[in-house]
Image (cartoon, rainbow, N blue to C red):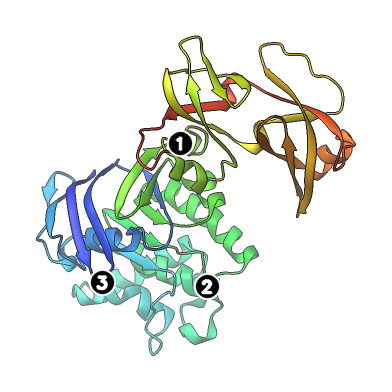
Amino acid sequence: MLIIDSMSKSLGEFSLTNVSLSVGDEEYFIILGPTGAGKTILLETIAGIYSPDAGRILLNGRDITDVPARDRNIGMVYQDYMLFPHLTVEANIGFGLKSRRADPAFIRGKVQESADLLNIGHLLHRYPGTLSGGEQQRAAIARALVMEPDALLLDEPLSALDVKTRESLRAELARIHEATGTTIIHITHNFEEVFDLADRVAIMHGGDVVQVGTPEEIFRRPNSDFVAGFVGVENLFCGMGSPDGTVAVGDLRIRVEDGMPGPVSLAIRPEDILISKTALPENGKNVFSGRIGTVRQNGGLVRISVEAGIPFRVTLTRQGFEEADIASGDAVYLAFRPSAAHVYSSGSPDGA
């Protein structure tokens, strides 16, 4: 539905470098990456705010690389709403249709429909300054959706909201996407938004897209040290892979599901590791003995460091930690499945 082909754009210290990406029709596509990775420039170039220095953008088979923003039929919503303060919510939502000189009765009907979809139909007479942050963001999204865009671009739309409002609007976005089938491209730093909303995810770093996949693929099968670290893989080791499906890391030989020979990186998520004071049966698992170092409470989770020849990080729920009955200095056993140990080449982008 949307194809970005070898696109580059430089804006001072921010840039895109030879970015290629495709987004399917009706897909909810999320873009993650650190500050300065080029996420917003990418969205604004898709929207037509900037022209690329090189490459092409195709929308539904049409080359829109040089098409003015107003003629692309792409909606964009920023985190700071950007509503007109002197206009009512109704006038804000209908602004684009009025600019197209649509019939006033048609505008009223479409505005009411869009406002009802966002559950703000009762606020049409109000002004933005009298609304909460969540209500303002709903109005901004309604203003974009009323134009029936081919694609809706969301630049961190929930980041300025409090936790409760953010959770509520996240559920609203999922419902709206299901109801309208609009193709959505959404920038965020919030992993909960990824798992609640995304069909697929792209990770950006240094002006380029470094991995694309489903949330499960991105979080459990990273293709580089950068992606592994970014998505919270705290157990990241350099090792030597063998054809027998093991990786030597220090004095340990770790069984993996998809082995490869030669220098490799090995990523294991901390929540995939079992920990016990009593010996654990192997049953095909990796089992190692070690000793607990630090124990840190972090909200509903407990983060534990274990020295087992190499340093492991383990994450337990508070209940799991209490049931394990463990403390700093205890001798323990660790276990994890070979499928939890993801291997990729150390020659991968940003690899060790």
Per the image, label 3 sits on a secondary structure element best described as: helix
Relative vertical location of residue 212 with respect to residue 11 in this rendering, above or below:
above
User: How far apart, in angstroms, are the residues tagged by discs 1 and 2?
Assistant: 37 Å
Mark 1 residue crowding within 10 angstroms, few (<14) / some (14–19) / many (20+): many
Specify the quadrant of the image occupied by residue 237. top right
Relative vertical location of residue 100 with respect to residue 330 in this rendering, above or below:
below
Residue 70: x %, y % from top left: 18, 68
Mark 3 residue crowding within 10 angstroms, few (<14) / some (14–19) / many (20+): many
Per the image, label 1 sits on a secondary structure element best described as: loop
User: On the rendered structure, is 229 left or right of 310?
Assistant: left
User: How far apart, in angstroms, are the residues tagged by discs 3 and 2?
Assistant: 21 Å
Relative vertical location of residue 281 with respect to residue 170 in this rendering, above or below:
above
Q: Nearer the viewer, residue 171 or 113?
A: 171
Residue under label 1, please give it.
222
Residue under label 2, please give it.
135
Residue 285: x %, y % from top left: 67, 17
Mark 2 residue crowding within 10 angstroms, few (<14) / some (14–19) / many (20+): many
Q: Nearer the viewer, residue 172 or 232?
A: 232
- The disc labelled 2 sits on which kind of residue? Glu
Residue 352: x %, y % from top left: 43, 38
User: On the rendered structure, is 296 left or right of 130?
Assistant: right
Residue under label 3, please give it.
97
